[in-house]
Image: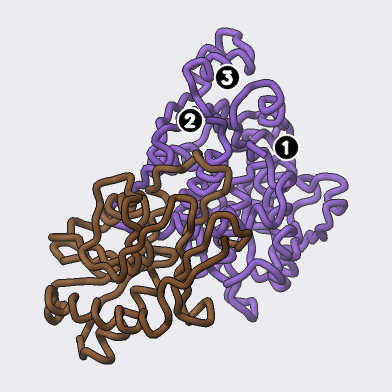
Chain colours: A purple, B brown
């Protein structure tokens, strides 16, 4: 397979290979010179039809650390605004001899659609509320790093599950690696039939935290909400926000994760985000190593 | 057809002692020198040399590291086999130090070339030397020669030279495997 479209389409072995490769890249990133020449004959285009800070920078840095030639564009400044279709846009980029495309798009399935219609290796950097595979990988990788293993761990994903591609990729990755997953959030932000993925739904945050080893706190995605899903931010925070008091009242120390960007004071307080239990910045650090591993492994399979 | 023993356990032991002595001649107490085993197979050779230097020849505070140069190789995307990386462990400064690369077999010189590039990520050694157990003569693709060699071997290009170490193969030996056998490499 020459694409990474979603965690759903890869196996546990694939994930383990990505993790082992990422271990080596993490070591590379600790060297005085953090660059390797592996991909100096590979050109990669990052095309982001949706806003992104972390993911875009992380992908770009990963590509540069591998010595690939990188071009990046954001839809806001592109000819997409002039009415060009997705396939045309990408084919024009590929005509400039680009080997790999990293794409974020607001439509679920956009990456899959592209993989069927253009001749390049596609990495999905988020397609609507569908999947965000590299985030799912780096979250599991961070759990493995913090707790030694993912298998047997209990992970709860809290918040806006309905609009979250991070949730879906996390569920697939964690389950493939042998973890048990629950989701927690207001009923309005819980997708119907989510149980069919083999996850339990918990509406009570305290119960969810008492059960879990790791809590992955999602951001409330206001930009995807066409109607009001809860009465007020204040009420959401009261029911689903994690505070230091809540964490201290548990009889164990759980790991707090967040894919970013954080709404400080909404899903978690500043104190929690900056506490020793939080691995939020480790996630960002691991993101570069995971993306280096994904791109390196995909590039190995590029046609000469 | 088949395979031939190039070096026995006893011969390897004699060679290890000779190489250790040659290293001491040039590097004294190793205060300015470090040993770096090239992954994957140079690690065992480096460990063996290090244990001799420390335990038999009383070298104190010898620093030993392992370098994997997979990401610096020139055959990425040229082979169908996935190239798997190994661990790099260099917990010391190489800047202005005398680095001794240690590998089991010197063949085309390409992996040494990649190691020479890879080590630059860690700093600028004052000097780099190369110690190999087996030097396959007349098969170099690059102008690279060892400073210390255990045994020089003539082998035709399709032959394989396999170095076995007690630690992972049960015994010390060096075997020449003829290309027509089905022996796994």
| Residue B105 in picture, x, y percent from top left | 38, 63
> Which of the chains bears the disc numbered 2?
A
Q: CA distance from mark 3 to mark 2?
A: 12 Å
Instruction: Same chain for labels 2 and 1? Say yes or no.
Output: yes
Q: Residue at x 52, y 51 (%)?
A: B83
Dot 3: few (<14), some (14–19), or many (≥20) neighbours within 10 Å?
many
What residue is shown with label 3? A90
> For mark 2, what is the residue?
A44
First in sequence: mark 3 vs mark 1: 3
Residue name at image x 74 percent, y 46 percent: A8
Q: Which residue is mark 1?
A: A228
What is the crowding at mark 1: few (fewer than 14 residues within 10 Å), some, or many (at least 20)? few
Label 2 or label 1, whichever lies nearer to me, is: 2
Could you tell me how far apart the alpha carbons at marks 2 and 1 are, in whole angstroms?
39 Å
Mark 3 vs mark 1, CA separation in Å: 36 Å
Q: Is residue B137 left or right of residue B94?
A: right
Determine the image quadrant of residue A132.
Answer: top right
Q: Which badge, 2 or 1, is on the more N-terminal residue?
A: 2
| Residue A290 at x, y percent in the picture | 52, 51
Q: Are marks 3 and 2 in contact (CB under 8 Å)?
A: no
Q: Is residue B164 above or below residue A177?
A: below
Q: Is residue B157 left or right of residue A218?
A: left
| Depth order, front residue of B118/B149 | B149
Which residue ends up furthest to the front in the rendered image? B1
Instruction: Report if the CB atoms under discs 2 and 1 are less than 8 Å apart.
Output: no
Residue B131 visible in this rendered orientation of the protein: yes
Quick one: quadrant of the N terminus of chain A? top right
């Amino acid at each position: 397979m020459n694409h990474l479209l979603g965690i759903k389409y890869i196996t546990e072995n694939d994930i383990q290979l990505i993790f082992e490769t990422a271990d080596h890249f993490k070591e590379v990133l600790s060297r005085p010179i953090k660059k390797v020449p592996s991909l100096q004959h590979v050109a990669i285009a990052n095309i982001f039809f949706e806003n992104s800070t972390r993911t875009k920078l992380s992908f770009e840095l990963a590509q540069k650390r591998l010595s690939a030639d990188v071009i990046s564009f954001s839809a806001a400044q592109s000819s997409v605004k002039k009415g060009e279709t997705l396939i045309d846009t990408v084919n024009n980029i590929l005509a400039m001899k680009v080997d790999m495309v990293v794409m974020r798009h607001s439509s679920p399935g956009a990456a899959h659609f592209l993989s069927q219609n253009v001749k390049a290796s596609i990495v999905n950097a988020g397609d609507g509320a569908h999947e965000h595979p590299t985030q799912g990988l780096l979250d599991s990788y961070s759990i493995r790093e913090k707790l030694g293993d993912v298998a047997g761990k209990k992970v709860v994903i809290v918040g806006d599950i309905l609009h979250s591609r991070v949730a879906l990729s996390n569920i697939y990755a964690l389950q493939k690696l042998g973890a048990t997953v629950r989701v927690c959030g207001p009923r309005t932000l819980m997708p119907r039939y989510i149980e069919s993925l083999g996850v339990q739904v918990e509406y009570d945050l305290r119960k969810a935290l008492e059960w879990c080893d790791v809590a992955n706190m999602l951001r409330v995605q206001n930009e995807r909400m066409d109607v009001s899903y809860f009465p007020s931010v204040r009420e959401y925070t009261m029911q689903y926000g994690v505070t230091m008091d809540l964490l201290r009242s548990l009889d164990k120390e759980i790991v707090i994760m967040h894919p970013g960007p954080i709404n400080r004071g909404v899903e978690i307080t500043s104190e929690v985000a900056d506490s020793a239990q939080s691995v939020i910045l480790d996630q960002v650090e691991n993101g570069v190593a995971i993306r280096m591993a994904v791109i390196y492994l995909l590039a190995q399979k590029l046609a000469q | 057809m088949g395979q031939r023993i190039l070096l026995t356990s006893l011969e390897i032991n004699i060679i290890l002692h000779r190489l250790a002595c040659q290293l001491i001649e040039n590097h004294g107490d190793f205060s300015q020198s470090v040993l770096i085993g090239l992954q994957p197979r140079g690690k065992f050779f480096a460990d063996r040399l290090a244990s001799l230097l420390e335990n038999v020849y009383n070298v104190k505070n010898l620093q030993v590291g392992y370098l994997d140069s997979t990401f610096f190789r020139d055959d990425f995307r040229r082979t169908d086999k996935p190239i798997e990386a190994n661990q790099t462990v260099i917990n010391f400064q190489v800047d202005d130090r005398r680095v001794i690369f240690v590998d089991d077999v010197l063949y085309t010189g390409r992996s040494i070339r990649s190691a020479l590039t890879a080590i630059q990520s860690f700093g600028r050694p004052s000097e780099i030397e190369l110690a190999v157990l087996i030097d396959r003569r007349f098969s170099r693709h690059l102008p690279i020669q060892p400073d210390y060699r255990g045994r020089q071997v003539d082998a035709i290009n399709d032959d394989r030279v396999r170095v076995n170490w007690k630690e992972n193969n049960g015994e010390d030996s060096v075997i020449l495997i003829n290309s027509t056998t089905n022996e796994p490499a």
